[in-house]
Structure formats: C-alpha cells, structure tokens
C-alpha cells in the first residue's frame, strides 16, 4: 500500500494561528526521528546507533517486537525512514517532506509505502483504509506536538544548542 497526504503547518489565511518557521519545523521532524517516544505513546524505547553524516540507525521496541530502521536526513527538506525486511516484517518506508508552495505557507507531505502493494480483496482494502486513517491521525498528532514545542520555544536553535 502506498499512501500520501499533506498536513498544513502555516495557513496565511488564518492570522490567529501561530506560525512555525521552516527551521523550527525541521528541528521538530528531526526530534520525531531521534526521540520518537515523545510522539508515539505505544513505543517503549528507541536506541540510536551507527550515526553517520546525514543518517543513523535505530532500534525501536514495542513490547516484545523490535524493529530496526535507518533514518536519512536531508537538511531542511526531508526525513526518511527506511525499514529493511526483518522476520515477518516487509520492507517499508516513510518520508516526511517539507514543502513551501508560497513564502507564507508551510506543509509536510507524509509518504508511506508498506511494501505490500495495493490490495483488491474487500478485507485487505478495509484494513488498508484503517491503516491510512491511523497514519493520518498520527501525523496530525505529530504536528500538534510540534506546534506545542514551538510555542514553548523548544524548537528554536538557541534552545537546541
């Protein structure tokens, strides 16, 4: 299943909404990769290892389930998560891409590929629809958390250094 959607960060037509800078958004997306337990309450632990320039590997623990992935950072543009096949888990990926269609508007495009292809039978189509909804809800929640952190100054360069 491949799935993508956009989450609006800044809406120039809504003057009451707090705006987030591209730099704050970038810091927040990197934070989601480096400290995913802040964003995923069902995640028990995340260990980062094998840091290289522009990437690192992680070991995620969900109870007894352990998943390893690789995170690739393209500064100020994209955070990509690549899960290689392991055990009964197929290869999959998530890309979070910062888009700025205008100077006043920021978006994040979330692109999922679960490595399973498109299903045609009714049961799996329903399951895919459920997964898409869950992904979208989690991504909106991620942006909600980033907005809160930004409003507290926790995504500013001075705070992070």
Image (spheres, rainbow, N blue to C red):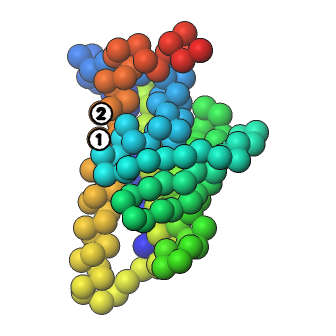
Quarter of the picture holding the N terminus:
bottom left
Inspect this view and state whether residue 158 appears. Answer: yes
In this rendering, the answer to whether 47 lies above or below 99 is below
In depth, the one of 121 and 52 nearer the eye is: 52
In this rendering, the answer to whether 84 lies above or below 30 is below
In this rendering, the answer to whether 14 lies above or below 35 is above
In depth, the one of 13 and 59 nearer the eye is: 59
In depth, the one of 46 and 56 nearer the eye is: 46
Q: Position of residue 130 (x, y in %)?
A: 25, 67
Inspect this view and state whether residue 8 appears. Answer: no
Quarter of the picture holding the C terminus:
top right
Q: Residue 83 falls in which quadrant of the image?
A: bottom right
Please tell me which residue is depicted at 36% across the width and 60% down the height of the picture: 63
Please tell me which residue is depicted at 37% across the width and 23% down the height of the picture: 149
Q: Position of residue 93 (x, y in %)?
A: 53, 61
Q: Which residue is mark 2?
A: 144
* Element type at mark 2: helix
Say if mark 1 contacts mark 2, CB within 8 Å. Answer: yes
Q: Which residue is mark 1?
A: 141
Please tell me which residue is depicted at 60% across the width and 32% down the height of the picture: 76
Marks 1/2: CA distance?
Answer: 5 Å
Q: Position of residue 34 (x, y in %)?
A: 53, 38
């Amino acid at each position: 299943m491949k799935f993508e959607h956009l989450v609006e960060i800044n809406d120039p037509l809504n003057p009451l909404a707090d705006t987030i800078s591209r730099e704050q958004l970038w810091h927040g997306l990197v934070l989601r990769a480096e400290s995913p337990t802040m964003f995923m309450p069902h995640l028990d632990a995340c260990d980062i290892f094998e840091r290289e320039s522009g990437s690192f590997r992680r070991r995620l623990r969900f109870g007894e389930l352990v998943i390893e992935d690789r995170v690739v950072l393209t500064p100020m543009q994209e955070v990509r998560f690549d899960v290689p096949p392991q055990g009964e888990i197929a290869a999959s990926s998530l890309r979070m891409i910062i888009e700025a269609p205008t100077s006043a508007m920021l978006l994040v495009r979330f692109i999922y590929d679960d490595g399973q292809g498109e299903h045609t039978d009714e049961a799996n189509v329903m399951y895919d629809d459920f997964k898409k909804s869950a992904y979208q809800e989690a991504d909106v929640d991620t942006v909600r958390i980033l907005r809160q952190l930004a409003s507290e100054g926790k995504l500013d360069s001075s705070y992070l250094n």
